[in-house]
Amino acid sequence: MNIFRLIGCFLLHLTPKFFLERWLTRRLSPKGYTFFPRFSGRAALFDLASTLRRETVVPVALFPEYVCNIVPKALTEAGWIVESYKGNEKLEAEWVYLLDRIKRGDVGLLVGATVFGSSGLLDDLIVQKNLADLKYFGVRVIVDLAQDIRLVDKLPEYGNDLISSIVSFNDKSFPGIMGGGVITNIRLNKVDKLISIKLLYILYKKFIIKTMPIFIKKIVPDNDDKEDLRFEYSFCDHFPFRLSDNYRMTKLQFACAIQGIFQLKKYEKYKRYFLNQNIHLETRFASSAAYLIVNGDDGLDKNRKRKASYAVEHDMKISVRPTDFILHNKGFDDHA
């Protein structure tokens, strides 16, 4: 972040929270869906998965094997029996395989995720035959858009009785301090849980540290819930990264999210430059992805941040794609 971003967020912070929430809700509610703000993307996923579990008789949830371990963790804690499915080289699922698995009759939930520019099942969900099959077998769908909020407008209107989505405002599509939400036509309850003064202080402190010049970060490091591992693995064991941190979204988070949405076009300019200069895995939505899989580091900017491959949900030392070379391409904060 920088001082100009701080000033912009401060000015938005002067606006009554009601107006910030109303604007963001309208912006993130494509036709047929409604946006419900949540304290974080992971809290949104847990809340949505829990709601769908209460409404579904059969217990199995299918999720992509190459995804952040938060996804199966949230599903499991929401009461689902999780089972992973494979993707191809470009991280796309084979719909024929998914349908064969669904036909066994014990699947109630199908989860897609737009990791590293993959479609997250969006391409499959615009096919009416596929939606008809899902409806026949009583399967609901969650599309995880945590890595790319730009894809909200690609949620298909036809099928909104089956499809829901979650988004995150935490440093993927734009800079933020947690925050996220559910996009669905299900009528979700409003969150009544208020954040304590102590935790609110921690949140504002994290925002100030991220916004100040780089030397401040060296004085007060901003730790998240990931240990220094070979593969990326989240523990969700302390604020604000716990699934149980389902507080009302704060005014600060609304302000950061709205500012970030206004800045998306600027970030896209920087993203396109890197895309045009480097060979990368041409996944379905690579042009707007927060991270790109590239062919090694030859000739690349050595200061560009690298992202570790995802560990599997049951073992932080194993990844299904251990050799992927993944670089940041957010359009902001891409360099160490």
Image: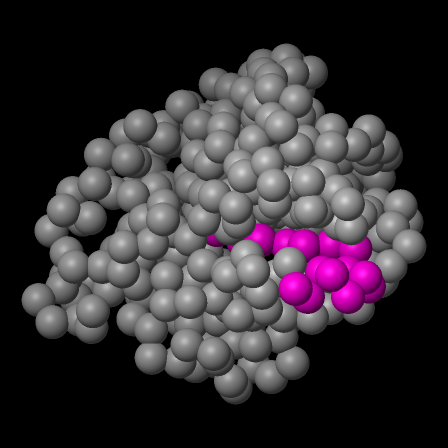
Residue at the (48%, 80%) spot, across then down: 319
- Left or right for 264, reference 68: left
Can you give x and y, in whole percent of width and height, for residue 103 in the image? 74, 61
Q: Quadrant of residue 18?
A: top right
In the image, residue 98 above or below residue 199:
below
Q: Which stretch did the figure color magenta?
A: 100-114
Rendered-image quadrant of the N terminus: top left
Q: For residue 27, which quarter of the picture?
A: top right
Is residue 209 shown in magenta? no
Residue 213 visible in the snapshot: no
Name the spot of residue 29 as percent of width and height, x first: 61, 23
86 lies above or below 164: below
Q: Residue at position x 48%, y 18% from top?
A: 11
* Residue at 13%, 64% in the rendered image: 300
Q: Residue furthest left?
A: 299
State the residue in front, 180 or 145.
145
- In-image side of 254 versus 39 (left or right): left
x and y percentages locating residue 332 in the rendered image: 31, 44
Q: Is residue 113 in view from this perspective?
A: yes
Q: In the image as oriented, which residue stretches furthest toward the front?
A: 129
Display coloring: one colour
* Residue at 40% over, 23% down: 262
User: Observer-nearest residue: 200 or 131?
Assistant: 131
Q: Quadrant of residue 298?
A: bottom left
How many callouts does the rendering have?
0
Q: Is residue 112 magenta?
A: yes
Left or right relative to 174: residue 26: right
